[in-house]
Image: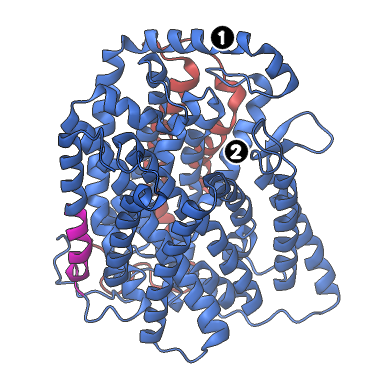
């Protein structure tokens, strides 16, 4: 749930075109339209990282709710 | 065949191409499995790729050479709406984060290789699975063809095979490149693109970062770039005012006009929803080791979006740098040739061409898996052994590539582009079967099929009716939202109809008590992870992780 709330801006902001469809303010000569969308990439990553950390707890709860042990028994965990 | 070719650029290019060829064949021995004679190994690389490899593999798979050529080309041509690729690639990852781990889990628990396998297991309908599989194959074929188009423009700019009158000599380099690709995909399967993706992505990152920091500076800075572009578009619009008024030419601009905002947003949303319905994306995801890999990658893959955004702006830089090409798709390679020292231009060309090989390989593997599992095994040879499946897939991967080659060489390139556009419309129609199916069995299997058919038919019909200044049909991805003056992406409209039909038909079929089939999956299957029963690691954990 909280994960969805965290990720929502990463979906809504890029689709809200009237918000950023303008020339000014420019950044180093680049119109707002371009640099704002590139900035949104960083915003989305900034939201996805905490969403990932939160999702691990949610995951454990989900597993228990569905009759699985809270951690997989076998070779999970470390990866390459 | 090789006049006007810069020897140094060509030498560097050839060296890098040979390097990935060797890698492609050597990949069969990488993370070695007991046998490659089954689809888990050949078609999914042993389902064992961790975060690091998956980042290269999926990044190399989604951000194709054609994208790298076409997005800057759109900006070069003054069609700023092409920049929707950026919001599209931002929106896609949160969606991935939410639903793909479920698909991963259920696929591993039940040994599903393709999205249509899941549909079959979930809805107990070979026909619905066939519809999903054929849509996937149909949407993937022109996508492979476009990778060839991407390679072709680079070869043309390099001057390879463009000056001869014989089509055979002209296209020979393309034949060779694709033949080599087909051979190592055949022998190494998914391991080949996974290993080559390291080289491809490293080259692409180096080339684009150098290009973005070096070239704009060379041509006078971003301020100068945008004022030059602005002047050039303004004068184009003034000179062609009559043609623009009659619709014979499209106005150019550096930011979208307010009227195009919905078009921009709907293209971004529709494409983002469609992205992970494509068989090659799902194949890349199913090749990962555990549930977390895909979530971590949702935070890591946007690095490629950043690259694409910067690259797109090079379309404007090309205008400011005075690049004049008939075919806008040549603008980026031409800019590289004009601005870089020959050896680095060779690296840049190799980056794009190798960039075409990785997705082409994965796409052909994904299409071949769909054929094998959901047509061959489901209808033709129901008792196929694992080895027979792998053989069938290997052969079909060759056929698919050959088909794409014939497509581009014998038919028109425009047809490939039109079909790829349709492919986006089509593939989105499989979303209810796959994504909604991941959460609920409420939709009736025949209702999902009816919705799919309605969406396919209406989407195709709408696309057929779109005229552009250069063609009468399939002229673009946008139509007016019925009853309004606002243009939106066809795929989303068709998807809307698809959903409505699926819901209404479900209510009707329920009321009529039509059999729903037996769901093979259980709720806990959607949460299973590596180490749970039925989700064992297929690789020896002691095997070296990196080549």
Q: Which chain is red?
A: A
Q: Would residue B446 appear left or right of B160 to someone viewing this image?
A: right
Which disc, if any, is residue B267?
A: 2
User: Element under label 1?
Assistant: helix
The answer to whether B387 is drawn above or below residue B443 in the figure is below
Reading the chain from its start, which is encountered first: label 1 or label 2?
1
The quarter holding residue B215 reads: top left
The image position of residue B249, as x and y in percent, is 65, 23
> Which tint was used for chain B?
blue
Q: Residue B400, can we see it?
A: yes
The image position of residue B57, as x and y in percent, is 32, 54
Specify the quadrant that holds the C terminus of chain A.
bottom left
Question: Pointer 1: residues within 10 angstroms few (<14), some, or many (20+)?
Answer: some
The residue at 56%/68% (across/down) is B133
The residue at 58%/53% (across/down) is B423
Q: Is A19 one of the magenta-colored residues?
A: no
The image position of residue B151, as x and y in percent, is 36, 45
Which chain letter goes with mark 2?
B
Q: Residue B124, can we see it?
A: no
Question: Pointer 2: residues within 10 angstroms few (<14), some, or many (20+)?
Answer: many
The answer to whether B221 is drawn above or below residue B168 in the figure is above
Q: Main secondary structure of the magenta part?
A: helix
Which disc, if any, is residue A26?
A: none
Q: Which residue is mark 1?
A: B234
Q: Residue furthest bottom?
A: B383
């Amino acid at each position: 749930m909280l994960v969805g709330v965290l990720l929502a801006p990463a979906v809504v902001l890029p689709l809200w075109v009237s918000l950023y469809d303008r020339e000014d303010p420019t950044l180093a000569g680049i119109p707002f339209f371009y640099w704002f969308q590139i900035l949104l990439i960083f915003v989305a990553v900034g939201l996805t990282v905490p969403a990932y950390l939160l999702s691990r707890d949610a995951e454990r709860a989900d597993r228990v709710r569905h009759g699985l042990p809270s951690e997989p028994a076998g070779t999970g965990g470390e990866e390459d | 065949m090789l006049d006007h070719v810069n020897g140094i650029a060509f030498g560097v290019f050839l060296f890098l191409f040979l390097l990935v060829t060797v890698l492609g064949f050597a990949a069969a021995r990488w993370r070695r499995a007991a046998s490659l004679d089954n689809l888990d190994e050949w078609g999914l690389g042993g389902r064992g790729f961790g975060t690091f490899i998956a980042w290269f593999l999926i990044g190399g798979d989604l951000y194709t050479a054609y994208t790298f050529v076409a997005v800057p080309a759109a900006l070069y041509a003054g069609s700023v709406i092409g920049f929707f690729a950026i919001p599209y690639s931002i929106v896609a990852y949160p969606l991935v984060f939410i639903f793909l781990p479920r698909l991963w889990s259920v696929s591993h628990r039940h040994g599903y290789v393709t999205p249509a396998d899941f549909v079959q297991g979930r809805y107990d309908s070979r026909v619905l699975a066939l519809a999903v599989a054929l849509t996937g194959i149909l949407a993937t074929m022109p996508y492979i063809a476009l990778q060839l188009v991407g390679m072709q423009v680079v070869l043309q700019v390099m001057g390879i095979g463009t000056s001869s009158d014989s089509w055979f000599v002209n296209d020979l380099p393309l034949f060779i490149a694709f033949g080599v690709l087909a051979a190592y995909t055949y022998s190494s399967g998914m391991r080949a693109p996974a290993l080559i993706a390291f080289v491809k992505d490293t080259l692409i990152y180096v080339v684009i970062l150098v290009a973005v920091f070096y070239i704009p500076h060379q041509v006078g800075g971003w301020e100068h770039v945008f004022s030059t572009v602005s002047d050039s578009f303004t004068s184009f619009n003034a000179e062609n005012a009559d043609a623009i008024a009659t619709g014979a030419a499209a106005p150019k601009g550096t930011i979208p006009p307010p009227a195009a905002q919905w078009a921009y947003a709907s293209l971004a949303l529709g494409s983002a929803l469609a992205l992970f319905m494509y068989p090659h994306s799902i194949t890349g995801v199913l090749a990962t080791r555990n549930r977390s890999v895909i979530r971590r990658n949702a935070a890591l893959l946007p690095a490629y979006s950043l690259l694409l955004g910067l690259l797109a702006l090079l379309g404007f830089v090309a205008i400011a740098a005075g690049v004049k090409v008939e075919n806008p798709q040549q603008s980026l390679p031409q800019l590289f040739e004009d601005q870089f020292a020959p050896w680095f231009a060779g690296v840049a060309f190799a980056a794009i061409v190798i960039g075409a090989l990785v997705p082409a390989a994965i796409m052909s593997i994904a299409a071949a898996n769909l054929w094998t599992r959901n047509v061959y095994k489901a209808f033709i040879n129901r008792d196929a052994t694992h080895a027979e499946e792998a053989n069938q897939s290997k052969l079909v991967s060759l056929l698919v590539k050959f088909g794409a080659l014939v497509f581009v060489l014998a038919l028109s390139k425009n047809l490939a582009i039109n079909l790829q556009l349709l492919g986006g419309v089509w593939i989105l129609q499989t979303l209810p079967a796959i994504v909604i199916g991941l959460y609920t069995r409420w939709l009736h299997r025949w209702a999902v099929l009816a919705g799919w058919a309605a969406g396919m038919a209406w989407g195709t019909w709408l696309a057929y009716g779109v005229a552009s200044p250069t063609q009468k049909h399939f002229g673009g991805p946008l139509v007016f939202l019925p009853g309004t003056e606002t243009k939106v992406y066809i795929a989303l409209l068709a998807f809307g109809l698809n959903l409505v039909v699926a819901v209404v038909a479900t209510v009707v079929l329920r009321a009529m008590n039509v059999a729903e089939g037996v769901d093979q999956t259980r709720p806990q299957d959607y949460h299973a992870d590596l180490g749970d029963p039925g989700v064992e690691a297929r690789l020896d954990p002691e095997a070296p992780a990196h080549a």
